[in-house]
Image (cartoon, rainbow, N blue to C red):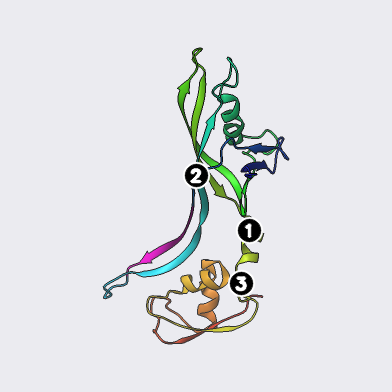
């Protein structure tokens, strides 16, 4: 027996609701990416890349819905509105609910970011009986979850760091402390009076935070 894909509602007034798709998707796309800041250094042929953050993963697919022949009053919108309704703001959450798309080993948790509905067949009464939905889910992770997933060296102990060409103290502070404003702590620990004049190849002391 073929397992049907399900959209589970995780939060809000519909929490616990499971919406079964009428037909499993023929394919789906998972998108991942990273965001970089590019810094131009005079004298270099190419800019220096600084990692800023990862981009939010997304899941996209096309869902087919068909209720032709169910009854004289059949209307496929009775099915599409169950999914479209997950874009609406929940009165308790003041935001759309979190959902999870589950199909076999695929379990994608987040929100429905966008939905396009295309109605392609109509009954004699003018009711749509066939539709195609293009759905995009966007993953949602809290700050705590993200820090648990990223192994980091603790900022509460002193470290050494080799100064590379193109490095700036604010960039190092952002990388080590996640706060570019703490560049002064690094400057003070290394006796740097002018942060714009840094010697490539120098070993910097990265002080622990009190």
Looking at the image, can residue 94 be seen? no
Residue 37 belongs to the span the image colors magenta: yes
CA–CA distance between discs 3 and 2?
37 Å
Spot the residue most to the bottom.
202
Q: Which residue is mark 1?
A: 143
Q: Which residue is mark 3?
A: 151
Spot the residue most to the front.
1
Q: Residue at x 43, y 76 (%)?
A: 195
Relative vertical location of residue 127 with respect to residue 146 in this rendering, above or below:
above
**In which quadrant of the rendered view does residue 16 lie?**
top right
Q: Residue at x 62, y 38 (%)?
A: 96
Instruction: Residue 105 in the image: state x and y as whole percent.
Output: 62, 54
Instruction: Residue 165 in the image: state x and y as whole percent.
Output: 37, 79
Relative vertical location of residue 35 with respect to residue 107 in this rendering, above or below:
below
Main SS, magenta region, reads strand
Provide the secondary structure element on which disc 2 rests: loop
Q: Which residue is mark 2?
A: 26
Instruction: Name the residue nearer the viewer: 154 or 158.
Output: 154
Label 2, residues with CA under 10 Å away: few <14, some 14-19, many ≥20: few
Instruction: Name the residue nearer the viewer: 110 or 180.
Output: 110
CA–CA distance between discs 3 and 1?
14 Å
Q: Residue at x 49, y 44 (%)?
A: 26
Question: In the visual, does 152 lie left or right of 165?
Answer: right
Instruction: Residue 188 in the image: state x and y as whole percent.
Output: 53, 80
Q: Which residues are magenta?
A: 30-40
């Amino acid at each position: 027996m073929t397992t049907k894909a399900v959209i589970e509602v995780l939060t809000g007034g519909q929490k616990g609701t499971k919406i079964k798709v009428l037909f499993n998707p023929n394919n789906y796309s998972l998108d991942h990416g990273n965001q970089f800041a590019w810094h131009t250094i005079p004298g270099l042929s190419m800019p220096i890349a600084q990692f800023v953050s990862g981009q939010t993963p997304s899941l996209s697919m096309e869902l087919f819905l068909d209720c032709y022949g169910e009854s004289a009053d059949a209307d496929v919108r009775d099915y599409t509105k169950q999914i479209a309704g997950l874009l609406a703001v929940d009165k308790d959450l003041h935001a759309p609910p979190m959902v999870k798309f589950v199909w076999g080993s695929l379990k994608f948790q987040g929100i429905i970011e966008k939905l396009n509905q295309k109605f392609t067949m109509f009954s004699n009464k003018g009711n749509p009986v066939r539709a195609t939905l293009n759905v995009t889910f966007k993953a949602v992770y809290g700050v705590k979850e993200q820090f648990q997933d990223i192994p980091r060296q603790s900022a509460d102990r002193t470290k050494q760091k080799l100064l590379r060409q193109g490095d700036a103290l604010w960039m190092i502070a952002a990388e080590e402390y996640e706060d570019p404003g703490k560049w002064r702590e690094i400057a003070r620990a290394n006796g740097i009076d002018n942060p714009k004049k840094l010697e490539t190849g120098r070993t910097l002391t990265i002080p622990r935070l009190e």
